Image (cartoon, rainbow, N blue to C red):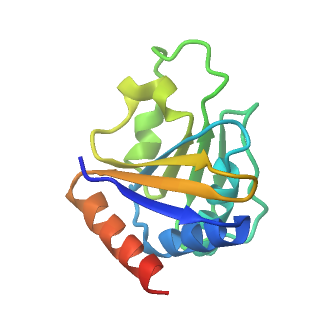
């Protein structure tokens, strides 16, 4: 599997990268986010939403499992499965994974068996107080191409 790593030195730079990804995503795209508490998963999702043209305030759906935003060019389905008790339970995630919008799943390893085979995995690691290492792990040709476009552009700015 091909991996791409980008280091950002501030939340603003992380957001800028996520905004650009939001401009590139298509209906049915699935993005998984992993990282420690406070690593920047929700900050990244806010940037992604901004790039998709979503104007509503995006925040973590920790206690509701999912929040849906429909005021952009595509719907955004933002899931946080951290508090799921039974990862074997079928909650109908595939309806969102195959839907008209973009699905972002925080703590996706908890529902690994329910994830689609092709997706964009993103791990966010805290390097220092403001610095992050963002590791893109595309699975499938579509996501490989998406990453190449995103990473090329981020290195050329």
Q: Toward the viewer: 87 or 128? A: 128
Q: Image height check: is 47 above or below 35?
A: below
The residue shown at (34%, 75%) is: 149
Left or right for 25, reference 10: left
> Going 38% across and 34% down the picture, which residue do you hit?
115
Quarter-of-image position of residue 47 = bottom right
Q: 21 or 69, which lies in front?
A: 21
Residue sitting farthest toward the bottom: 157
Q: Position of residue 4 (x, y in %)?
A: 37, 59
Residue 52, visible in the rendered structure: no
Q: Is residue 45 left or right of residue 55?
A: left
| Residue at the limit of the structure toward the left, as seen here | 141
Q: How many marks?
A: 0
Q: Position of residue 85 (x, y in %)?
A: 61, 13
Q: Position of residue 94 (x, y in %)?
A: 40, 37
Can see residue 1?
yes
Which quarter of the figure has residue 34?
top right
- Asked whether, in this view, residue 84 is left or right of residue 146, the answer is right
Which residue is pictured at 36% across the width and 77% down the height?
152
Q: Is residue 88 above or below residue 115?
A: above
42 vs 91, nearest the viewer? 42
- Give how far across and how far down residue 103 sits, in percent: 50, 50
Please give the name of the residue rendered at 56% of the width and 34% of the height, measured from the top-left corner. Answer: 107
């Amino acid at each position: 599997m091909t991996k791409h790593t980008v280091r950002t030195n501030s939340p603003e730079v992380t957001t800028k990268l996520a905004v650009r990804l939001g401009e590139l995503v298509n209906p049915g795209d699935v993005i998984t986010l992993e990282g420690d508490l406070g690593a920047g998963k929700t900050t990244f999702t806010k940037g992604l939403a901004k790039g998709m043209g979503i104007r509503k305030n995006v925040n973590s759906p920790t206690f509701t499992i999912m929040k849906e935003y429909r005021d952009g060019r595509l719907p955004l389905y933002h899931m946080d499965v951290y508090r799921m008790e039974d990862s074997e339970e079928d909650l109908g995630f595939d309806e969102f994974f195959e839907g008209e919008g973009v699905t972002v799943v925080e703590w996706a390893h908890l529902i690994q068996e329910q994830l689609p085979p092709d997706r964009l995995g993103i791990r966010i690691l805290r390097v220092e107080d403001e610095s992050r290492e963002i590791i893109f792990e595309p699975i499938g040709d579509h996501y490989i191409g998406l990453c190449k476009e995103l990473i090329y552009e981020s290195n050329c700015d």
